[in-house]
Amino acid sequence: MKRYPFKFLDAYTRDDRDIFFGREEEVEALYQMAFQTDLLLVYGASGTGKTSLIMCGLAGRFKPYEWLALFIRRGNNINESLQKALDEARGNAGALRSGRLDWLDEPEPVETAPLSHISRQLNALYQQHFKPLYLIFDQFEELYILGSREEQLAFIDMVRDMLQQEHPVKIVISIREEYLGYLYDFERKVPELMRKKLRVEPMNLEKVSAVIESVGRLPNGNARLLPGEEKAVAEGIFEKIKGRDNTRTIELPYLQVFLDKLYLQISGDQSRQADAVFSMAELQKTGDIGDVLRNFLDEQVLQTAGNMNVPPDDIWKILSPFVTLEGTKEPLSSAMLQERLPDATPGLIGNCLQAFQHSRILRFDEKEQRYEIAHDSLARQVHAKRSDEEIALLEVQRLIHSLAATKPEAREPFSERQLDFITPHIEKIVLNADELDWIEKSRDYLRQQKETEKQKQREELEKAQRQAAIEKELADKANAALAELRHKNVSIFESFSNLGTELIRSLDHDKALEKLSVAVDIDVDAEFKNLLIEPIEELLFFFAESGRRPDLARTAAELLFRLAPNSATDPLLKRCLDEKWEQRNKFQPLLKALRSYSQLQQRYYPVMIPVPLGKNGVFDMGSGDGEWGHQNDETLHQVKLSPYSIAETPVTFYQFALFCEANEKSIASRTPYWGRFGDHPAVNISWYDTIEYANWLNNQYSRTPCYKLNRKENSDSKNLVKNDWLKWKVDWKHKAGGFRLPTEAEWELAARGGVGAPRMLFAGSDELDEVGWYWQNSGDKPLSGDWDLNKIFDNNGRTHAVKIKRRNNIGLYDMSGNAWEWCWDWYARDYYEKCRDKGIVNNPTGAESSEDGRVLRGGSWLNLAENCRVAYRLNFNPDDRDYDVGFRVVFVP
């Protein structure tokens, strides 16, 4: 009798090994792996023939006496199915469990751990058959599609036990590759799971050709290929099935269904016993076949619906329960199907099952008494026909069934989100009493939970409010204590900060640095700390510019770095500290980067104002006989001067203190009885002090000094002053430009506001109160009447800060009053008369020598108003210092 060689959608078994073609390489690889490991994983896409490869290919390589193979599907529970398979293999399951076997009654050695139930069964089975046991778990993905978490974990533990067997037990697992990710827990507990695995590839042209050509050569087969067209027919079939898809492989079910369809087209024999010859002509008659499986399924559903006189949708509804939500097979008994479809009549269900079995859409498992879709490829087609509503209903059913199937003690109530999903569909699905009861209990539980949660929230709110009140009270106390501490800190900080600032103004820079160092360490807010930046910048400037004590400059730099570590000066401050700068010129880039540099430069160095000289530099010097307060040494005469600039103010204590620091001189010895103030004119200054200052100032600006000073006493033969105990010789280098004392003529022209300015009694006004400090306004209150020294002292007469009174027309301050100002000239009462007799005198420098001393100009806080006139002249011993005598400098280019 001839044999029909096509299996349609059925898997190949060992009995089909004579018609199983195209898988020789995979069969050999699988066979070799079976001897290399006790746990073998076979995976691949749906429709690649994994089951046939094992049940036919691998099984065909073993002789019956070489292995004992148990093929296991999940059924209702994979662990129960395994147990059932073992019981059936032994043929006497009860004997093992009841303990009637003699070998089980023998006591186990004390040192050996007790065997698990599954281990005892495997041992018994091996001793019964004495050949390797192969446990083959087919369509293993069903465990993760349909099984519970408990079922999965129990199976993993069972596999671990089986792998510990002394007797040969092999485990082969077949799974669709898209479910490999579900094996994470399995692999974590059984690491050898993935060590030996075989991927089953889809059928390519070479394998399809091998199948078709081999079938055509079967001696007893009823399907033949037209001689000479074998290769063309094989390639044509491959291309027909592949269609327009850009792929090099096809699925095996599509090939089997197409070959069956082509056979029926050629032979017309539904019994599949007649001969058929496959040729290119017959192949071309098939036309464009589209999706073979979908078309086949559609045809069978329409045919069944027509035979039963029902709508096709009713037939699809009967097929749908056999497919999971994931589009895989789900075996069902007729009773289970009836339970799923309560609206369908038993007659319709029975007729459909027979029709589907006859058309090979369903297959019936006699052992399990269940129907299932013939292949997962068909299951996907059924799943594709489902509507969104049907899918939603299936999801609801699965959710309810899976939770209700859990043991009551481990079952959790449905969540609010799950109940919201279930409720709209609950009337459209069939639920048993237990499931309905659990839904209602879940709702009650949820209501109780919400009420409990609300009560808990109320209690927590009340508790939080009480705690908040306590914490607020504590916080208020803490804040009050903190505020008090901050207030104390601020008070201490302000004391040190203010003291440091006042010490700078009183020219005690050393102590100021000490006080401000303490202030930096006091814990106050940044807004207060920022107040320290300017005075500490001043200390840095002072000690760096003086150049004598760079360590104090670096101390100030460190304080600045701590106050503002991210400021623009940060890199320079860090370099200063790291490199330990010593020389004055090293500090210059840092000083110029200070925010207060310009202000400090003007505070500690004179600001020079050019004196206007008109067309020819000639002006009338002295005073006329009719001027108020005129003296007989003020004879009016003409003088011509060369260009020069003069300091905006007299040299202040700030400026003179920098000179003293640089030259290690005492600023304290110059302190008047009312105290030192940096912005007051420096007083108690001798004429020799001014010479030293001018020379130092030139050095600061890298210029050649104007004076050559011989500090040997009595070295100046032109000094005829009896009470000058120094008489140092000072030579003026007239050709040298730079800073020096003004001559009388230079001083007076500057005070008058330059050539062409209106002549006034005082520097900038005819009213002394507007421009200068003198005996009547220099104390605590205005004085009047006759000049009286005691009255002046009682009124706290003193110098005042420069630039308080009005300036003259070229911007000079305090040239009348406040403090007398030294000039270069020797004093001679008749010097002006001699100048008058010479006509216009160019750049006069005073008498050649004198018994009366050097010239003072401008008057002071102690003097009468007439002494503060621009024209007034006074002589003074060069080495004398007094609390109303200071000076200012000029600059000659």
Image (tube, rainbow, N blue to C red):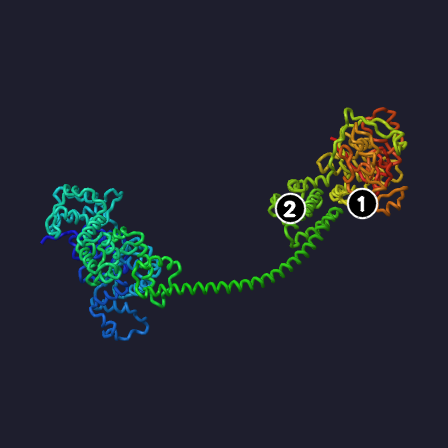
| Amino acid at dot 1 | Arg
Residue 473 can be seen, yes or no: yes
* Quadrant holding the N terminus: bottom left
**Circle 1: element type:** helix
Determine which quarter of the picture holds residue 70: bottom left
Q: Which residue sits at x=33%, y=61%? A: 400
Q: Mark 2: which amino acid?
A: Lys
Sequence-wise first label, 1 or 2:
2
Task: From the top left corner, tell me how far across and down residue 29 is, in percent.
Answer: 24, 53
Instruction: Using a 10 Å C-alpha cutoff, classify the residue at mark 2 as few (fewer than 14 neighbours), some (14 to 19) or many (20 or more).
Output: few
Look at the image and tell me whether residue 60 can be seen: no
Q: Which residue is mark 2?
A: 580
**Which quadrant, please, contains the C terminus?**
top right
Foreground residue among 175 and 837 = 175
Residue at coordinates 16% horizontally, 41% vertically from top-left?
Answer: 284
Residue 79 location, x and y as percent?
28, 64
Residue annotated with mark 1: 670
Q: Quadrant of residue 761?
A: top right
Q: Nearer the viewer, residue 767 or 498?
A: 767
- Select label 1 or label 2 by which is in front: 1
